[in-house]
Structure formats: structure tokens, C-alpha cells
Amino acid sequence: MAALALSIAAAVSPVGASAATEDPLIDYPTFKGASKNLDRNGAADLITSAGSKVKQRILRLTPGGYRQSGSAWATTKLDVTKSFESEFKVWLHHFRPGADGIAFVVQNEGPRALGGWGGGLGYRGIEPSLAVEFDIFKNSNDSSDNHLAVVLGGNPDFQAGTAEAPIELYGRPFDARVVYNAEDQILRVYVKSLSAGSEEQLALEHKIDLARHVGAGSAWVGFTASTGTGLSKQDIYSWTVQGSGV
């Protein structure tokens, strides 16, 4: 476990060359000092990661218990009428099979928003919202126990778009990048294993007028997660958002 924690920490890096010319709206290479700027609900908390060689502050959305849900929202709202890019490093781990996964969520309910446990991935009932699922448990409406999905209106029973993940989402750390092109109204989701030599892959693409869908020009952005009878520790090691605030 110590070696794996070390590999995650070593992989933390800026969003990328395309975004390097401007200061990020949200910038957590680690979550040190994030407590004042990150609203946490339910099971979510900021903790110090385990490992004898490397310790850092991380966002843990669920700590591995039964029927838990957690959410975390940046206090700075995001202008969703404009393009943005968010990158985050994730480690979903604990027992096998793991459950249920995490979601990157844009929502206009508020900074205390928290949905149900289990297949709702912590965002069920949050509306208006857009959720990008990284789902590691096959519920009745899911294609597999390793898929991505776009879900609208806080209803995980109806997936607006779905795709099999090109990498394993559970048990090994990975990098995810969500890119919204406001001009073309296209949302793209990329994933990348942190194994040496891995390349980023486009995993999911969905057309949406995000501002119209969330009912406003700005929204809260963050993460949700949940467990059910399957258990997972669901951790975010770093998070950046390149975009415009309001």
C-alpha cells in the first residue's frame, strides 16, 4: 500500500500545457489547506493518506463503511456558460467487490447537496445537475461494474450516455479529465491509468447545453460517492479546474 500511495503522489501534476497560461479556478495539487474552500457533507472528509513513505492531505468521499454517501463542493461557483476543464486523480480501493463509485457533478441545488447511498453514487435526487459517473458496481440499470455514464437531473436510473471504461476503475489509481466545450456544447471525459507508459484515452462524449440544463449561468462543482453492501474507500488525491468563476 505504501508503494501505491507513493506512485499516486508522484503522479500529481498540473492540468496540462493547454491550461498552463492561466491560473486555475480550483487548484489542489493536494488537499492541504482546502478545509475553508471545500464544503463537505455526509461521509466526506479531508484526511491524511496512509503510507510509511508518503503522506498527504486527500479528499476521502467514503471511508469504507456500509451504506455511506458523501459530497464535496468548491465554494467558488463555476461559470457554465463558458468552456472549462477539470482534472482529478482517483483511487477507489478496499474490499472486493467494491461499490459503488464516484461522480463528478455540476449542480445548482447548493453547497449542502447530498444524495442517497448505493447506486445513486451520492448524487441521487440532486437537481438540477449533471453527473459524470465512474461506476464500479453493476446495478440493474448498469451495463457493467466498470463503466462511465452521464446522468441528468439526479436520476441514476436513466443514463443519458454510457460507455465501458477503457481502464480498470477499481483497485488501481487513475487520472480523469472532464472537458466542456461551451461553443460546441460537447462534454468529453478522458481517463488514464497511472501505470508507466499509459496514455490518456477518450472514454465518453456527450452533447449538452450545460447552462440551460442546470438552469443558470453558474453552478457548484465537485464530487459525490456512495457505498451499499459493497464497500470502498473512495479518494481524490488532487483536483484542478481551469475555467471562469462568478
Image (cartoon, rainbow, N blue to C red):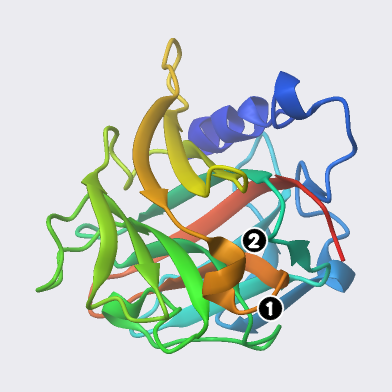
User: Which one is nearer the viewer's eye here, 154 or 118?
Assistant: 154
Q: Is disc 1 surrounded by few (<14), some (14 to 19) or many (20+) residues within 10 Å?
A: many
User: Which one is nearer the viewer's eye here, 221 or 89?
Assistant: 221
Q: Which residue position holds label 2?
A: 59
Residue drawn at x 47%, y 26% is: 194
Residue drawn at x 57%, y 71% is: 212
Q: Which mark is residue 207?
A: none
Please determine whether, in this image, residue 124 is positioned above or below residue 222.
Answer: below
Q: Quadrant of residue 181?
A: top right
Query: Which residue, as the protein is rendered here, is positioned at the far top?
Result: 197
Q: Quadrant of residue 61?
A: bottom right
- Residue 44 in view of the camera: no
Please determine whether, in this image, residue 161 is positioned above or below residue 18.
Answer: below
Please, what secondary structure does the residue beneath circle 1 have?
strand
Q: Which residue position holds label 1?
A: 40
Residue drawn at x 52%, y 49% is: 185
Please, what secondary structure does the residue beneath circle 2 have?
strand
The picture places residue 91, in percent across and down from the top left corner, at: 47, 47
Query: Which residue, as the protein is rendered here, is positioned at the far front?
Result: 183
The picture places residue 41, in percent across and down from the top left corner, at: 63, 84
The picture places residue 50, in percent across and down from the top left corner, at: 60, 50
Amino acid type at circle 1 is: Arg
User: Which one is nearer the viewer's eye here, 115 or 206?
Assistant: 206
Q: Quadrant of residue 74?
A: bottom right
- Residue 134 in view of the camera: yes
Q: Quadrant of the C terminus?
A: bottom right
Residue drawn at x 51%, y 75% is: 129
Q: Could you tell me if the residues under marks 2 and 1 are in contact, i.e. CB atoms within 8 Å? A: yes
Gap between marks 2 and 1, in whole Å?
A: 9 Å
Q: Is disc 2 surrounded by few (<14), some (14 to 19) or many (20+) residues within 10 Å?
A: many
